[in-house]
C-alpha cells in the first residue's frame, strides 16, 4: 500500500502549496508529488518576461507582472482539472490579488485604475461557481528571520537586491491574507517542524496530517443522514 492509499488521499485531489518567497514551496511540491504519485504544477519563473524588470522598477511593471501571473495561473488551473486532478501545485492563484496586487496599490506602485482593472478581471475569472478550486491549500509558515535566511541561501540575484523592508511587508501581508482566506480548506504547516531536504522520510507525517485533515473536511461537508 502506498502513502496515498494508506492515509486516504483521493487519487484525483488537487493540493496547492502557498506561502511567501523562500518558505520552501517548490521543495514541498516535489516531495509530496513524489510520495503520492501525483503530477506537479510550477509557476513559470524562468520564462517570465516581466520578473527581472519588475524587481528593478516596481511602479512601472507591477500591473504587467500581475496580469501575466493571472493569465498563466488561470490556464494552468484549467489544465489541471481538465486532466482530472492528482496534482500538487506550487503557489495559488489567490495570492496574486490578495497579497501582491493589493500591496502595490497600497504602497503606490500600482495606480488605482490598474488595480481596479486587475481585481475586476480576477473576480470575473476566478471567484465564480465555475472556477475549479483546489481540494486543499497547504500554507507554509515561518518567522521572518527564518525566511530571510532561506532567501539568502537560495541566492537569486534579483531577490538579493530587494530591500529587506519589502520582505517584511510581504511576510505581514501573507499572515493577514491566510487568516481571512476561505476559498478552500487550509492546512497550516510550520517550516521548523520538518526538514524534508535532510530527511525524506519526514514527508510521511505530513501526508498523515493531510489525510486526516481532508477526512475531517469531508465529514464536515457531508450531511448526516437521519
Image (cartoon, rainbow, N blue to C red):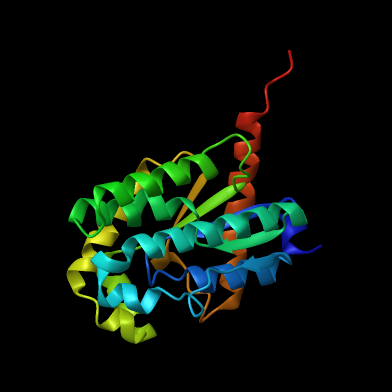
In the image, residue 110 lies at what x, y percent? Answer: 26, 56
Q: Tell me the quarter of the picture where residue 213 sits.
A: top right
In the image, residue 133 lies at what x, y percent? Answer: 59, 45
Q: Quadrant of the C terminus?
A: top right
Of 130 and 148, nearer the camera is 130
Of 119 and 173, nearer the camera is 119
In the image, residue 114 lies at what x, y percent? Answer: 32, 51
- Say if residue 34 shows up in the picture: yes
Answer with left or right where residue 3 lies relative to residue 77.
right
* Residue at the image point whose x is 19% and y is 75% from the top: 163
* Residue at the image point whose x is 33% and y is 86% from the top: 157
Answer with left or right where residue 62 lies relative to residue 42.
left
Of 99 and 68, nearer the camera is 68
Of 210 and 30, nearer the camera is 30
- Say if residue 184 shows up in the picture: no
The single residue placed furthest to the front in the displayed view is 113
* Residue at the image point whose x is 63% and y is 30% from the top: 221
Q: Is residue 65 above or below residue 105?
A: below
Q: Quadrant of the N terminus?
A: bottom right
Answer with left or right where residue 32 lies relative to residue 192.
right
Number of marks present in the image shown:
0
The single residue placed furthest to the right in the displayed view is 1
Q: Is residue 134 above or below residue 220?
A: below
In the image, residue 10 lies at what x, y percent? Answer: 74, 50
Answer with left or right where residue 148 lies relative to residue 163.
right
Amino acid at each position: 500500500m502506498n502513502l496515498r492509499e494508506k492515509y486516504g488521499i483521493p487519487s484525483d485531489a488537487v493540493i496547492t502549496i502557498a506561502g511567501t518567497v523562500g518558505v520552501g514551496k517548490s521543495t514541498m511540491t516535489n516531495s509530496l508529488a513524489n510520495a503520492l504519485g501525483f503530477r506537479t504544477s510550477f509557476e513559470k519563473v524562468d520564462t517570465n518576461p516581466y520578473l527581472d524588470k519588475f524587481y528593478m522598477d516596481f511602479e512601472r511593471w507591477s500591473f504587467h507582472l500581475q496580469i501575466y501571473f493571472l493569465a498563466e495561473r488561470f490556464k494552468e488551473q484549467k489544465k489541471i482539472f481538465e486532466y482530472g486532478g492528482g496534482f500538487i501545485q506550487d503557489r495559488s492563484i489567490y495570492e496574486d490579488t490578495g497579497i501582491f496586487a493589493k500591496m502595490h496599490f497600497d504602497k503606490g506602485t500600482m495606480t488605482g485604475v490598474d488595480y481596479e482593472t486587475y481585481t475586476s478581471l480576477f473576480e470575473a475569472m476566478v471567484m465564480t461557481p465555475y472556477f475549479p478550486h483546489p481540494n486543499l491549500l497547504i500554507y507554509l509558515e515561518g518567522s521572518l528571520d527564518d525566511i530571510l535566511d532561506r532567501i539568502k541561501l537560495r541566492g537569486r540575484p534579483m531577490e538579493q537586491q530587494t530591500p529587506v523592508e519589502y520582505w517584511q511587508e510581504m511576510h505581514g501581508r501573507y499572515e493577514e491574507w491566510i487568516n481571512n482566506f476561505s476559498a478552500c480548506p487550509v492546512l497550516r504547516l510550520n517550516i521548523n517542524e520538518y526538514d524534508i531536504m535532510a530527511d525524506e522520510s519526514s514527508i510521511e507525517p505530513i501526508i498523515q496530517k493531510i489525510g486526516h485533515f481532508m477526512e475531517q473536511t469531508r465529514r464536515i461537508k457531508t450531511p448526516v443522514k437521519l
